[in-house]
Image: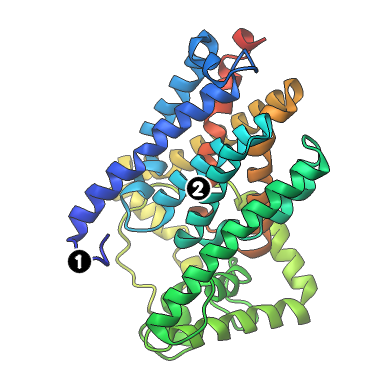
Amino acid sequence: LAMAGLEPVVAQILQAFLTAGSVLIVHKLALELFATDRDSERAAIASPIATRIATGAALLAAVWPNQARFEIALLPDGLTTLVMLSFALFLKRYLRTRAMRPLLSASVMLGLSIFLRPDLVLFPAFFFVVALVALTPREALRGTIVMGLALALTIGINTWKNYALSGEIVPLNLGSGTTMYEGISQFGDTLGTTYADERLAHNVFNTKELFYPNGVQNDRMAMRTAIDTIKHHPGFYASVVLRRLPLLFTVRGLYFSDTASLSDPKNDLAKRFPGKYIAMFREHPVEAAVRILSPLAGWLVVILGFVGLAMGLGRERTAHLGVALLLFYFIVTHLATNVEPRYFYPAVPLLYPYVLRVIFRRSVG
């Protein structure tokens, strides 16, 4: 929207309206996940407990501070969440009905996701293996092929668009190499790598901008460096993956302005802790308290969500298999690459219905 020439504020307002659709999708997904009559998707509307769970999940999606932050930021995360939730809804319907219509709808959402972020590019392979639990081999293969074709079409369009703009063959969005490069150094400057985009540009590429004027070449260089580091230092890479585990679902505190520029290579984030936060408590106690409590509340939501998902899988595996697969996919792929909180954020709203499942566990039975 902003790239189309709209003022940033206007683009933010339009994006806020679009991403508000996530609340509606969370509500619909929860209704269908906890339907009492599995012969009809509409039966959930008449189910009091499903309605209570869906209303609570939608309310959580509407008021959760970290979700609101991403939905107004001019980043792909809010729209990615909307597409992700829609994909989960149609995937759930396909696993239950085996019908072509929800499969095609899910494939369209999967393809659209590539234009925002290529998070789901490997999903069909995961789907084929896990879907054999609920589907026949033929049904699992059909779903995999249809989704794979949708991805191939979208990637082809994306490649053509990028070639028309840059003259370079770039199948996915620019930045994959940077993500990998930063991911192997998430815990400080190690093996010659750096964390922030601006520091990467400043220290490695000797330019003010990471993606201009040689963005494609820079990103490919970053990817080669990351792969080479992993190849020659597998022990170090394994230690980084293990250290990512506790950060995977850690929701950052609400963002407040930081006067120190990351473009300064001497500005080491580690050296500003804990002094930065002590000063924040002294000068801005309310904001600091919110920043501390926000990730703690985020962890509570995540824990309750996974407990509720386990309950759902225990009662009716097929109904909840699609959501479980999406979460498993995000965990595996992000542990292997980068656990920047906003990269994992689109998967978190999938847990909201299960948080309410735990709260209303006695009513569900």
Q: Farthest residue to the front: give it.
A: 100
Regarding residue 265, the answer to whether it shows in the image is: no
Name the side, left or right, on which 239 lies relative to 43. Answer: right
Task: Relative to 70, say whether 229 is above or below.
Answer: below
Q: Secondary structure at mark 2?
A: helix
Q: How far from the left and from the top, in percent, is residue 211?
A: 41, 80
What residue is shown with label 1? 5
Please state, as top left, top right, bottom left or bottom right, where the N terminus lies in the image. Answer: bottom left
Quarter of the figure with residue 317: top right
Q: Mark 1 or mark 2, which has the lower sequence index?
A: 1
Dot 2 crowding, Cα within 10 Å, few <14, some 14–19, many 20+: many
Please tell me which residue lies in front, 10 or 112.
Answer: 112
Task: Relative to 55, say whether 93 is above or below.
Answer: below
Quarter of the figure with residue 264: bottom left
Q: CA distance from mark 1 to mark 2?
A: 26 Å
Q: How far from the left and from the top, in percent, is residue 152?
A: 59, 64
Please tell me which residue lies in front, 293 or 255.
Answer: 255
Q: How far from the left and from the top, in percent, is residue 227?
A: 68, 79
* Amino acid type, callout 1: Gly
- Tag in front: 1 or 2: 1
The residue positioned 65% from the left and 38% from the top of the image is 322
